[in-house]
Image: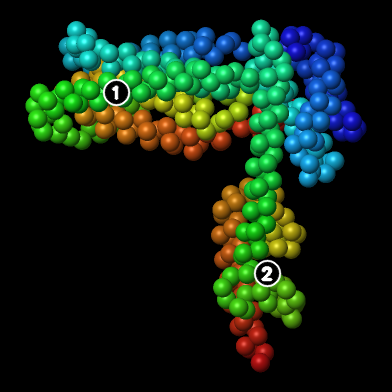
Amino acid sequence: MRAAQAGDAVAYTSLLEAIAPRIRRVVGSQRHFAGAQEVEDLVQDVLLSVHAVRATYDPSRPFAPWLATIVRNRLADGARRYARRSSEIAVDNQDVTFADPGANTSEEGYGDPQALLQAIRGLPPGQRQAVELLKLQGMSLKEAAGATGSSISALKVATHRAMASLRRALVKTHDTKH
Amino acid sequence: MTPSTDDLIRQLSGDLAPAPPLRRPFLRAIAWTMGAVIYVALAVAWMTSAGETANRWNEVPFTLQQLAALATTFTAAAAAFSMTMPGHGRTALLAAIVAAGAWVGLVLAGCIQDWMAAGAAGIALRSDWPCVAGMLLTGVVPGLALAVMLRRGAPLAPRATIALGALGVASLASLGMCLAQPHERDIVVLVWHGATIAAVSVLAAIAGRSILNWQRLSAAGAT
């Protein structure tokens, strides 16, 4: 690592190649439930982190505790991300399963797709975009926030309002027809 | 090893730029504290005329309080730097807790002395918004400098790191205000300065992940 800090690319390659299998072992043992691709993502995450903070390594100290701290930290971050993703899915579902018994009808097999499409077109641009990304394209809140530049909270609010507007519009259409 | 990890290693090694090791947290804390003390001293001199500056250095309790505030500034900064260095212990954090505890204890002791000397009037609280504003304004430049220095480290515990940095900055700003606007009663320092320091530290902790995060570092490292 000392040589790598001085800019020695060959030494750095050897170091990363040597630590990658060790990181993979640690990640694998800590994440029994993770698939091979997820383990590899975490390994790469750790390697990127090692690279980004290589200046924080003090050459007068042992290397292993330095690396172990980074691995532990990135694994904890990975677990937090996983937990957030799980809770996001729960929040997504809540948007369409609110107290009103009729709330689910627009999500699951609504009888008039044309009316639904028309109602979506009638939404304000922000709400329409939220519905398209989250409900039609199936993006997670995080992905949609990244794509639109909006905050997750703003997207949640927009989705909630959009669902309420759609519900009202569809009930109106239904009443008009019958 | 999957090809993508091989590719990543090749990419990281190919773009390798020298990254000289950061100096030890203790040394970085000394450097920052010296710069911040000079800045705050200039700010205090600008805010007050020479005659108005606190001339209480001959009072032992006052001097001890200010030394404890300075010790809190230094140890909190050292702890914050230490938290951005993987593999470093938590000795600096313990030192910061001891220094902050000693400081609060000394101010509390001052309040008790004021109460014993003047009764209820000794702990009668008056508002001190000018001090709050002065602390916030004085702390901006040292705070930004500390944030820039901390961002060179690893964001292992962003909230605690930034909160400790804020504690260091706010305690120094409090020291500056104690010199610029001498208080007759320590209860003002305890409540108004204490509340400002606590609020700044909590807000800093909330903003911690925006200031220090791996995403920013990884993106910078990968490009």
Q: Is residue B108 left or right of residue A14?
A: left
- Picture quadrant where residue A106 is located: bottom right
Dot 1 crowding, Cα within 10 Å, few <14, some 14–19, many 20+:
some
What kind of element bears circle 1?
Answer: helix
Tag 1: amino acid: Gly
Q: In this view, does B206 lie to the left or right of B87?
A: left
Q: Where is residue B212 in the image (x, y as percent from the top left)?
A: 58, 30
Give above or below for A83 relative to B160: below
Chain letter of disc 2 in the image: A
Of the pair B110 and A122, the residue shown nearer to us: B110
Of the pair B141 and A37, the residue shown nearer to us: A37
What kind of element bears circle 2?
Answer: helix
Tag 2: amino acid: Arg
**The N terminus of chain B, quarter of image:** top right
- Picture quadrant where residue B67 is located: top left
Q: Which residue is the site of mark 1?
A: B105
Q: Where is residue B127 in the image (x, y as percent from the top left)?
A: 20, 35
Q: In this view, does A8 lie to the left or right of B67?
A: right
Kindly tell me whether residue B125 is visible in this rendering: yes
Q: Is residue B175 left or right of residue A29?
A: left
| Picture residue at 48% right of the left edge, 34% below the top | B205
| Picture residue at 70% right of the left edge, 63% below the top | A135
Q: Do the residues labelled 2 and 1 touch (CB within 8 Å)?
A: no
| Picture residue at 90% right of the left edge, 33% below the top | B2
Kindly tell me whether residue B50 is visible in this rendering: no
Q: Disc 2 to disc 1, how far (Cα)?
A: 65 Å
Q: Which residue is the site of mark 2?
A: A121
| Picture residue at 23% right of the left edge, 15% below the top | B62
Q: Where is residue A87 in the image (x, y as percent from the top left)?
A: 64, 53
Q: Position of residue B217 (x, y in %)?
A: 66, 28
